[in-house]
Image (spheres, grey):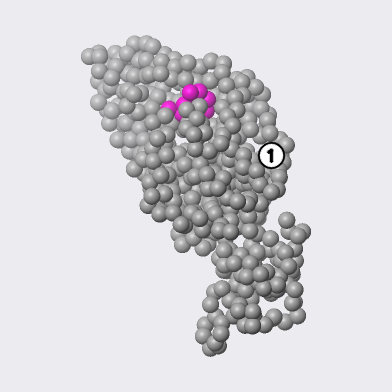
Amino acid sequence: MASLLEELNQQCPEELGRELHSFAASLYPICRSITGDGIRQTLEAIAQRIPLRISAVPSGTKVFDWTVPKEWNIRDAYIRDRHGNRVVDFQCSNLHVVNYSTPVHATLSLDELRPHLFTLPGHPDWIPYRTSYYKEDWGFCLSHNQLLQLEDGEYEVCIDSTLEDGVLNYGECFLPGCSQDEVLISCHACHPSLANDNLSGLSVAVFLARHLLAQDYLRYSYRFLFIPGTIGAITWLAQNREAAAQIRHGLVMTCIGDAGGFHYKKSRRGNAEIDRAVSCVLRDCGEPFETLEFSPYGYDERQYCSPGFNLPVGCLMRSVWGTFPEYHTSADNLDFLQPESLVRSLRVCAATFDVLEGDRKYINRHPCCEPQLGRRGLYRSTGGEAIPEEIHARLWVLNLSDGDHSLLDIAERSGLPFFRIREAASALSDAGLLADDQKSD
C-alpha cells in the first residue's frame, strides 16, 4: 500500500501547486472575520471540496473565561473628500476597514479623523491589517502615501456594518480511522485578504483531507478544524472536551506558503511524538528548517496546549508570524504565496502523517547475532563495496527491534529517513525476521 507521500509524489508538482494556489485565490477576496458572512462563505467553499460539519454557537455563550462575541458583518465603507471622491474605499481592499468596526456615518475634519487612521510609515505603499474584536471602536487602514495626500478639510466617513447578536461558526471535517485516537489539524479561517497568514494553511489542510479521504487504511482518525483564531479554538475546546481527550497528535498550520524555510514550534510537552515526527521529517526534507521551543504566545496551539488540556499540538510554519515585513499587511497577497512552497509544505505534512501512521515497535525473531540476510535476498550479492542505505536500515531495524524501540526511535538514532526504516521493517517482516509488537498499537 502506497503511503500518503508516495501518492502525492505521483502528481505533477506544478499542477498541484496551481491547484493549491487557485483555491487560495478563490478565497482571497472574501472579507472574513471571527464571525459573520465572510467566515460562512469560506466554510461553504471548503465544504464543496471535503465533508464539513459547520457549527453555530450563539453570541453570549460562555466558553471558559470568554464569551462568544456579537456577530459582525459589513457591506461597504469609505472616506469621501469634499469633491465626492472615495479616497479610501473598502471595495478596493477589505483591509481598509479595521476589522469589527462599529457602524459610523459622519462628517469629520482631518484632525478629528486622524485618531481613527492606521498606516505603516516604514512601508508607505502597504495597507496594515488591524482589528478591534473585543472593544467596540471603528477605524480605517490605508497606505501612508494615501494619508500624506489627504488635504485639510472635512471628510464624509461611512462604515456600513452591523454588530449584533448572531453566531460564531466553525467547520469540522472528521475522517474515522481504525482507532478512536485522533490527529488534529487546526487552521484559523478568520483573516480577510491575507494569503500566507490564513489561506496557505486552509489550502494545504483541505488538500490533505482530500488525500486522506482516498486512503484505503487509516490507523488514526483525523479531525480538521477551520476556526476563527483564539475564540474559535476556545469555543471548540469548551464544547468538545470528550473529543479533545482523544487527540494524540496535533498540528496548527499557518504561514506555510511563502518562500521562507520551515519553522516548527514544539508542543508544550516538548518531546511529544508529533514533535519528534515533524523534526524527523524536516531533517530529511532538503530545505532549511528551525525547531522552536514552546511559548505561550502565537496561534491556537497555545489554547490546545493550555495546562488544563496540555494536548500534544505543535505549530508548523515557514516564516514565523511577526518576523516578515509582509505579515498582517496588504503585501501578504497572492504574489507572496508561492505555489511550489505550498506543494512542499503539503509534502512535509503528508510525510509527518506517514510517520504517525507507520510508527510501531517490532520484535527481532533472531536476536542472537545477525541473521543471514544474503540467503533471504536482503543483502548485497558481492562484498567490498560501500553498504547501501537500505541495508544500513535493515541492520539498524534488526538491532533495535527489541520491543522497546519504535521505528521513529530507530530513524532518530540512525539518522536515516523514516521511510527507509519503514521499508526495512516491511522487508524484514515479509522475510519472517520481525514480529509486530501488538502492544505498540
In the displayed structure, would residue 185 be above or below residue 65? below
Image location (x, y in percent) of residue 201: 49, 42
Using the image as rendered, state which of residue 408 and residue 107 is in the foreground: 408
The residue depicted at 29 percent of the width and 13 percent of the height is: 154
The residue depicted at 47 percent of the width and 16 percent of the height is: 162
Instruction: Report the magenta stretch's main SS.
Output: loop
The residue depicted at 59 percent of the width and 35 percent of the height is: 172
Image location (x, y in percent) of residue 338: 38, 48
Can the viewer see residue 55?
A: yes
Q: Quadrant of residue 222?
A: top right
Using residue 320 as the reference point, say whether residue 182 is left or right of it: right
Image location (x, y in percent) of residue 134: 54, 24
Q: Count all numbered tags in the image, as a single digit.
A: 1
Q: Secondary structure at mark 1?
A: helix
In the displayed structure, would residue 419 be above or below residue 251? below
Q: What's drawn in magenta, residue-wise?
A: 31-39
Using the image as rendered, state which of residue 287 and residue 226 is in the foreground: 226
Residue position for label 1: 244
Q: Quadrant of the N terminus?
A: bottom right
Q: Please tell me whether residue 9 belongs to the stretch shown in magenta.
A: no
Q: Quadrant of the C terminus?
A: bottom right
The kind of residue on which mark 1 rests is Ala
The residue depicted at 60 percent of the width and 79 percent of the height is: 377
In the displayed structure, would residue 164 be above or below residue 413? above
Number of residues whose C-alpha sits closer than 10 Å to that of mark 1, classed few (under 14), some (14–19) or many (20 or more): some
